[in-house]
Image: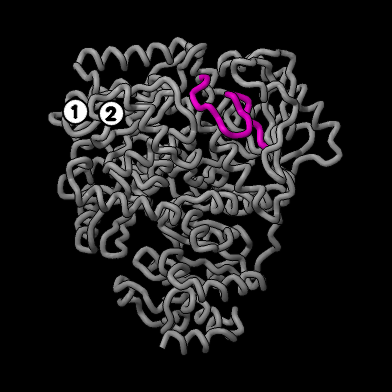
Amino acid sequence: MFVMQIALGGCLKAPPIHYGLTDDTGGHIAYVLAATHALEARDDIDYVEVVTRRFDRPDLGAAHARPYEKLGPKSGILRIDDGVADYLSKEALEAQVEAFTAAFLTHLDGLVRKPDVIHAHFADAAKVALAARARFGIPVIYTPHSLGLDKAGAMAAPGMARRIAAETRAIAGACATVVSSRDEAERQVSAYPGADPARIHCIAPGATLPAAPDRDAARALIAPWLGAPDKPMILAVARPVEKKNLVGLVEAYARTPGLRQRANLVILAGLRGPGRQGSAEQRRVIAGIERAVRTHGLEGRVALPPEHDAAALAGLYALAADRRGIFANPAFTEPFGLTILEAAAAGLPVVATCHGGPSDIVTRIGHGLLAEPNDPPAFGAALSRLLGDADLHARCRAAAADHEDAYSWAAWAARVADLMARIAAPRPLPAPTRILASDIDNTLTGDRGALTGFAEWRRQGHALFAVATGRTITEARRILAEWDIEEPDAFITSVGTEIYRRDATGRLVFDETWAQEIESDWRIDAIRDTLDNPSIRAQPEIEQRRWKLGYLGDARQAMRIRNRLDMAGLAARVIASHGRLIDVLPIRAGKGAAVAHLAKSHGLTLDHCVVAGDSGNDECMLRAAGRAIVVGNADGDLCHLPRRPGLYRSPLAHAAGLLDGLAWAGLHDGAGAPQLRMAAE
């Protein structure tokens, strides 16, 4: 594939990058360059071209005036002249997008080989890419990096209405929106009109330190600022803009008893050396940091170097880790948080904002604490706790060492390349005669060896394959990717309350007819109010869905919830699973009803369906389908399922049990099943 990426803002060039050189020279450039490197390393990628504006500003670097710059063996930067020679800030760039689009389309028109996919970064680039799609039919992937709706909720900013409108058009128009965290996918992007969860993909990037660490350079950078430079370090790295809340970090450091005695605070806030005055906002934030340092008498304890290079930055991460320090990200909201991953790569524990992507990263890696950035004492208390608890700090360091299990650029490139291939050449589904609907966790997953046999079964095309899971589509995709399971033909998610299936072109779409069917009698606000009780614990907010409320508890607690709803006259289905999860759904919903609806949409019935599961939220489909498989590792939730001719309990666990059941159902020749059974015994 020939992949083109478009990123218009900031000073984009081959490394090294001077982050913070301008307001718009930030983390998205690190993302674009790392993504390019990861994609070009793949055999299925022929070339990656990064497209940006050409401008001539010697003070920002001569490279930006060059029409072309080589990046790697299969990649380069193409700079297009849009008629304005000067560097343009994000605000000024808005008026120039039309001229850039015209120049870009002219360039494409002259290419013998058009790109197979365009990946646009930010809404201005998406506008350009969507114009190319309209003219040439080139599929478009969009990555927003930061979103106006979320920013508007955290702080006021001029021009926000126009920005949100542009992002709305990008999300609605792109073939796929690729974001980095579950929070972005399920809360931020999904809040926009026209957002379709089927086209929103959470594909986490990797951690990349900008250079080999130079500890000596790092020491020299901060020593002039500090009275005791060998103390443990609280390190923050962010552009000096208000949303990063760097002044709030100084306040938290100053107000927390004992913190200034135990650690220094080091803030890398962009590049502000000679000739680099920065924007009015940058100057205002730096002045606010300096004022807070003076007000609280923190001279000699806070370092705010105006200049640094990539090696010194990496050296600071390393020094902070060496001295049992911590990394701090106090942003009011953070779309993702590449610096949180950089800290993990350096083995440095973190205290991060609880708003946005860092909550996803810290939860998955486990290398630090989350705190409320709007509450300086609470943020300071988290800093003090992590700094002062040696056992906690050691556990966080150990977790950081395993960060690549959760975040790697190679894994990102594999998933994005697969997505690009699917949207560039969608494959219509043949009319199915049978459907297999399987749970994911502990039914499909759990045995990688058996999944090899399942992948071969899928290639033979015996049936339409759907997953039926309690997870959201975002999380379902993540787990499937972690287990190297190819995306299914259909998703039944959130315990059978959402269905995503292929249309006539092979594109995955949200099933609106199913949503309308289960909406009747679903009084979600009344149900939520009725269950708002100290004795009933809700699952985290991100687990709550439009047609599913999640709670914590066992089967007895589920019965209490059911009784409470019955007494209130509220119709709902209450499902307990895994001994700890309770889901409250519309009375017409559930995995069994969803499988029946999916079958009906293909002109089939439940008699044409084979289902497989292992827990309580699978029970209704195991009872309803013509053929049902209970894998050998099933929970006790399913012990009471009555025997019937269409139900098979496999002695084998996970995907081995699924294959065994498929042989029983006549959908598999069973060649591998005896071997698998012998291995299990």
Q: Residues within 10 Å of mark 1 (few under 14, many from 20)?
A: some
Tell me: residue 261, above or below residue 502: above
Q: What secondary structure predominates along the stretch shown in magenta? A: loop
> In the image, residue 283 lies at what x, y percent?
41, 12
Determine the image quadrant of residue 62.
top right
Based on the picture, tell me whether residue 473 belongs to the magenta stretch: no
Kind of residue at badge 2? Leu
Q: Residues within 10 Å of mark 2 (few under 14, many from 20)?
A: many
Q: Secondary structure at mark 1?
A: helix
> In the image, residue 658 lies at what x, y percent?
49, 76
Left or right of 253 on screen, residue 647: right
Kind of residue at badge 1? Arg
In the image, which disc is placed on residue 265? Answer: 2
Name the residue located 32 percent from the left edge and 22 percent from the top edge: 224
Name the residue located 28 percent from the left edge and 26 percent from the top edge: 249
> In the image, residue 37 lies at what x, y percent?
62, 45
Tell me: residue 373, above or below residue 576: above
Res 523 visible: no
Is 669 in front, or is 313? 313
Left or right of 67 on screen, residue 124: left
Based on the picture, tell me whether residue 11 belongs to the magenta stretch: yes
User: Given contact means CB atoms under 8 Å apart, are the residues at marks 2 and 1 in contact?
Assistant: yes
Determine the image quadrant of residue 215.
top left
Name the residue located 58 percent from the left edge and 65 percent from the top edge: 465
Determine the image quadrant of residue 600.
bottom right
Q: Which residue is mark 1?
A: 260
Name the residue located 42 percent from the left edge and 20 percent from the top edge: 306
Q: Which residues are magenta?
A: 5-22
Residue at mark 2 to residue at mark 1: CA–CA distance: 8 Å
Tell me: residue 566, above or below residue 437: above
Q: Secondary structure at mark 2?
A: strand
Res 190 visible: yes
